Amino acid sequence: MRVLVITGAGVSAGSGIPTFRGKDGYWRNLDPAKLATPEAFVRDPELVWQWYRERRQRIRAAQPNAAHQAVAKLAQHAHEFLLVTQNVDDLHARAGSPKQKMVQIHGDIFVTRCSRCDFSRHDYEHDHEHDDEQEQKQDGGSLPKCPDCGALMRPGVVWFGEQLDLVKINTVENFVTGGDCDLVIVAGTTALFGYIIDWALRARGQTGQLIEVNPEKTSLSQFATRSFREPAGVALPRLVNELLSNVNRRAPTY
């Protein structure tokens, strides 16, 4: 099978990672959608960094759930496979989805990059990040500064109002235009971004299945060949097992 999987925040919600939208997404009574902007960072970088440091800690403490594991299982069995995730956490990777077959289209929360130049680093380990913070406090500041140009460092994610990474867009485009997919799964996303709908519809071609997994209807629902109105952690494992058993039944025996 040639398979494209697109995932959103609903896939990680089962691991205790709050979605932006909804009452559980609020942080200190603040709307995360208003913190995840370039304007918020300019206005109050300390507040934005406090939020991202807490999010990093929460993600480190979380474990992949059954939805992440189901996607990883599908990746192992598909002939051609790409996972496009809107999630900035590392739970798909920790569940076993190969990084070379995954695009984090909205960035990686554990990347810290310069707000001015091209410097970036991966700040996953808690001890490493704590050491950085101690160094910054000794220097008289509490915010990470770029070692190359001295500008403020920021989380390596795509904020509202920013452009997507062209390299990542090209990776997805090359897969989508490389041939029709037998199967497109869109799971745990409200599909509010036009490019998500565009990739899903173009990838399925004329004959492919488009399966949506989301508790509520979205703008993509009208195009789906099958819909599962359940949480991703419930529906995806069952769906993947069904798909793989069907493929195995069709496989020739010698």
Image (tube, helix red, strand yellow):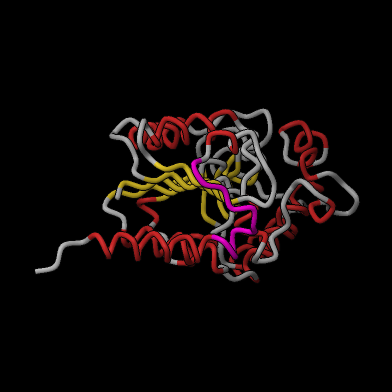
Front residue of 58/53: it is 58
Vertical placement of residue 227 versus 72, above or below: above
The segment highlighted magenta reads 225-235
Residue 108 part of the magenta segment: no
Direction left: furthest residue: 254
Nearer-the-camera pick, 57 or 33: 33
Looking at the image, residue 90 sits to the left or right of residue 145; the answer is left
| Residue 253 % position (x, y) | 14, 67
Q: Quadrant of the C terminus?
A: bottom left
Residue 133 can be seen, yes or no:
yes
Q: Residue placed at 45% from the left, 48% from the top?
A: 5
| Residue 46 seen in the figure | no
- Residue sitting nearer the eye, 181 or 139: 181
- Answer with left or right where residue 245 lies relative to residue 120: left
> Hey, which quadrant is residue 243 in on the image?
bottom left
Q: Percent from the top left, x then y, of residue 220? A: 58, 35
The answer to if 231 sits in the magenta stretch is: yes
Residue drawn at point x = 58 percent, y = 45 percent? 156
The residue drawn where x is 76% and y is 46% is 21
Residue 210, x across and y down, in percent:
46, 42
* Outermost residue toward the right in this view: 29
Q: At x 33% / y 61%, what residue is drawn?
A: 246
